[in-house]
Amino acid sequence: MSAGSRDGGAAGGAGGEAVPAQRAGTGGAAGAPGSPAGGGPGARWRTWRPHAAADVRASVVVFLVALPLCAGVAVASGVPVELGLVTGIVGGVLVGALPGSSLQVSGPAAGLTVLVADIVGSQGLRALGAVVLLAGLLQVALGLARLGRWFRAVSTAVVQGMLAGIGLTLVLGQLYLLADRPQQGGPLENLAGLPSALASLPADPAALAALAVGVGSLLVLRLWRRAPARLRVVPAPLVAVLVASLVAAAAGLDVDRVRVEPLLEVVAPLTPAALAGLEPLAVLGAALTVALIASAESMFSAAAIDRMHTGPRTQYDKELVAQGVGNGVCGLLGALPMTAVIVRSSANVGAGARTRASGVLHGVWLALFALAAPAVLGWVPMAALAAVLVQAGWKLVAGVPVRRLWRSSRSEVLITAATVAGVLALNLLEGVAIGLVLALVKAAVQASSLRAHVREDGEDVHLHVEGSATFVRLPQLADALDSVPAGRPVHVHVPAPERLDRACREALDSFVEQRGARGEQVRVHHG
C-alpha cells in the first residue's frame, strides 16, 4: 500500500478527506496529557488550559467523524457494532494519552476490514481477540527494538497497491449491502455476481428501498462539500447517516438497520477457555499480518499528519509502542484491531486541535455515547453505513496517482497493479508479498549497473566488466563472456570480489574452466 489520506490510511493521498494544513502552535503539545514535558498534573493543566477550548471543539468534530466510521468498519468486518466503538474508545482514551504522536487519532480502520472479516469468517469471532492481542505484543516489541521508522521504508508502489486492493475489495462487498443483499464471497466472486444482482432488483421492493437509501447517502456524501462553510463543520458521514435514518423512519421503509446490544453484554474479554481449539499457526500468521499492516498504516499516517501542523514531530518508536499497547487492550476485550486513522487525524488537525487532549476527549465522548445512548444506532439503515464505506473504499482506490506514476516510472505502476491483482485474486498478505518481491527485484536492478566491452590488443583479448554484478545482471554478463573470441589469450578485468555476487562469480569461474579445458589461457584481474 496512497499512501495517502484515508480512513486507515497511509501518507501520500489515497483516500481520506483533503484537509488544509493547520499551523498548530508548537507550544500546544508540550504539556499535553502523556507528554514527557508536563512536570506534573498542575503544570500540565497550566500548559493545556490556554488550548482547552480549541481541543474540546476539535474533539467533538473528531467524535462526530469517528462514530459512523466505527460502526461501519465493524459491520464490514463482520463483528458487532459495539466492538468498533470499543476500539474507538481505547484508541482515544488510552493511545491518545500515550507519548508518540501529539495530534494523531487511532481507532478501527477501513484498511483492516478485509483481513478481519477473513479472520472472523475462517476462525470465528473468538479468535479475533487472540490475534489482536498477539499483534499488539508484536508491535510493542518492534517499537522497543526501535524499528518504528523502518516501516516507512516500504515501497510506495506496494503500499498504494495494498490500499487500492483493500479499497476495491471493500467497494465490491459494500455494493451488495447498499441493497441489503448478501455478498457472494471474495472480491472476484462479488464482481462476477453484480450483473445478476442488478437484474434481480426490480422484483424486490425491499432491496429497491434499501438501494434508494444507499444511493441517497452516497449523494449526500458527494455533495456535502458544496454546502455553506458554516454547515460543513458537521462531518459529511454523520450528515449522510442522519439524513438516511430520518428519511427511512419518516417513510416507514422496510430496510435492514444496525443491530445494537448493550455494550457491556457484547464485550467478551479474552479468556484461556476462548483459546481452546484455535490453530496456533493460523493465529500467529494472522497476528503477524495485522501487526505489520497496522504498523505500516500508523507510521504512514504519522508522516502525513506531521506535514499538516507545526507542533512536535512524531516519535515513531514510541508511537509504535502506543499502538501496540492499544491493540493489546483491544485484544483482551475481544474488539477490533486499531491503527492511526488519517481521516480522523486530519479532521483533528483541521478542527484546530493543539494538544493530544483532543484525541483523548473524543474517546471519552465515544464512551459516553456507547454507554448512555447506543440504541440511537438502531435507527441507522445498514445501507447508509455501506454508503460511508463505499466512499471510504473508493478514496483508497482513487488516491493512487496512476497518471503521475506512469509518467515518472512505469515500473512503479506495474508493481502497484500486481499488488492490487494479488490482493483481489489471492488475499491481502500474498498480494503484498508479490508487490514486495517485485519492488525488491526493481531495487536490485537499479542498484546493479553493469557495463561490459571487449578490447583487442594484438593477440590478446581484454574483456572489461565495470560496475556491480548481481544475479539480475547475469544474462548481460553471460552475453559478454560468450562474445569473447575463442583460441586467443583472454584477460578478464572484473570489479573487486565484493561487487560480484555468487551467481556472477560462478558464471565467471565456469567461463575460466571451460576455456582452460580447451587449452586456452585465461587470466582474471580484479579491481
Image: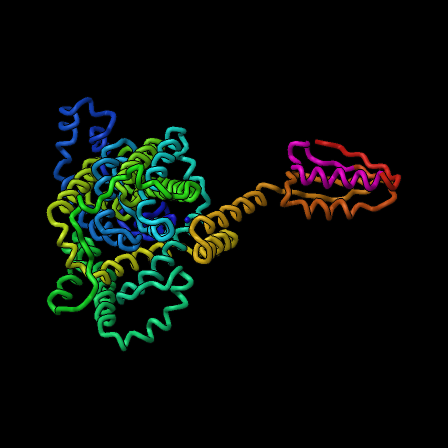
Q: Is residue 36 left or right of residue 500?
A: left
Where residue 374 sits: x, y (%)?
14, 50
493 part of magenta stretch: yes
Q: Is residue 379 visible?
A: yes
Which residue does the image show at 29% across and 74% down from the upper left? 201
Task: Identify the magenta region.
Answer: 492-516
Q: How is the image coloured?
A: rainbow
- Quarter of the image where one finds residue 135: top left
Q: Is residue 420 left or right of residue 363?
A: right
User: How many numbered discs sit on the rendered protein?
Assistant: 0
Which residue does the image show at 16% across and 57% down from the upper left? 378
Where residue 453 sits: x, y (%)?
73, 44
Where residue 207 sits: x, y (%)?
25, 70
Q: In the rendered view, would you say 185 is above or below 54?
A: below
- The quadrant of the picture occupied by the C terminus is top right
Which residue does the image show at 13% across and 33% down from the upper left? 50
Where residue 25 sits: x, y (%)?
22, 35
User: Hey, which residue is sitting farthest bottom in the picture?
Assistant: 203
Q: Is residue 116 visible?
A: no
Q: Nearer the viewer, residue 516 or 481?
A: 516
213 part of magenta stretch: no
Q: Nearer the viewer, residue 299 or 476?
A: 299
In terms of secondary structure, what is the magenta stretch mainly?
helix
User: Hey, which residue is sitting farthest top in the picture?
Assistant: 39
Q: In the rendered view, would you say 97 is above or below 259?
A: above
